[in-house]
Image (spheres, helix red, strand yellow):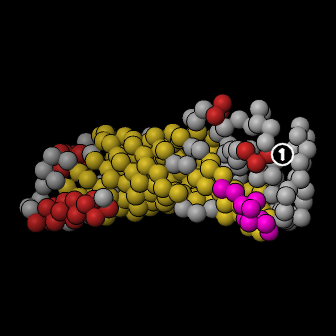
Amino acid sequence: MKSAAALIILSLLLSASVNGQNWGGGVDDTDLHFGFTFQYVSSEYKILKKDTWRSNQYIDQDNPEMIPSKLKSISSGSSPGFGIGFIVNRKVSEHVDIRLTPTLVFNDRVLKYEYDDPADDMKKKVQANLVEFPLGVKIKSDRRNNFRAYLLGGAKFTTDISSKKKTSNLLITDPSEKFVNNKRNYLSYEAGLGFDLYFEYFKMSPELKLSYSFNDVLNHEPHRYASPIDKLMLRHITFSLFFE
């Protein structure tokens, strides 16, 4: 699948480079235009632990419990996801655009807990169905035939639309079944780079972008999986294909 996608992108790159200067659907001739995007997302947490993350006995007020053995580590690997969205692009000048790209993203994350006793090890999935509203400034180079490079910087507002009934800890009595939840809303800053490739009737832009949450995204709850963590910072690497 990845090889097929790479071949398609390579073919489009070659097509854009060998032809004469293309019209690109006229998107650069208008002050306001629209489009759509497909995204591949890889996300992970930066975990900041409390000083007492190993030694504390974490107690749920409604269901007292003690950790079976001491924690050895809390980690987060990269988790894949995908997104679809649309583009609202406002031209400011020949080299500057303002771009809003509302996107629906499906990207669950995983936290891994390792204990002194391997039998207590646990993976906790953090479910996330997100609506993102990235607002960025796109700074473009001069166009060279059917190619233009650009840099992007900005911020995004994210809201989680996952059903809270499916991730609520209120009715869970088994401590090992508790969910780790994120805050419903949070802000991130973003930076990226990409290329505008012009074809006769449209413009395609492959883009690579990094985003990082401004603040802690953990919903702090009194159970063995959330209590050892001081802060969870979320970072995304996003590869996008924009069509305008």
Image quarter for residue 40? bottom left
Q: Nearer the viewer, residue 201 or 6?
A: 6
Task: Name the kind of residue labelled 1 in the image.
Answer: Pro
Instruction: Residue 217 in the image: state x and y as whole percent.
Output: 68, 49
Residue beneath disc 1 = 222
Instruction: Residue 243 in the image: state x and y as whole percent.
Output: 28, 47
Q: Is residue 177 above or below residue 209?
A: above
Which image quarter is the C terminus in? Answer: top left
Q: Nearer the viewer, residue 141 or 117?
A: 117
Crowdedness of circle 1 by 10 Å Cα count: few (<14), some, many (20+)?
some
The span shown in magenta is: 114-123
Q: Is residue 230 above or below residue 144?
A: above
Instruction: Name the secondary structure under disc 1.
Output: loop
What residue appears at the point 89 percent right and 48 percent down from the top-left corner? 65
Is 202 magenta? The answer is: no
Instruction: Residue 33 in the image: state x and y as whole percent.
Output: 30, 40
Instruction: Residue 213 in the image: state x and y as whole percent.
Output: 62, 54
What residue appears at the point 66 percent right and 37 percent down from the top-left corner? 167
Q: Nearer the viewer, residue 18 or 145?
A: 18
Image quarter for residue 114? bottom right
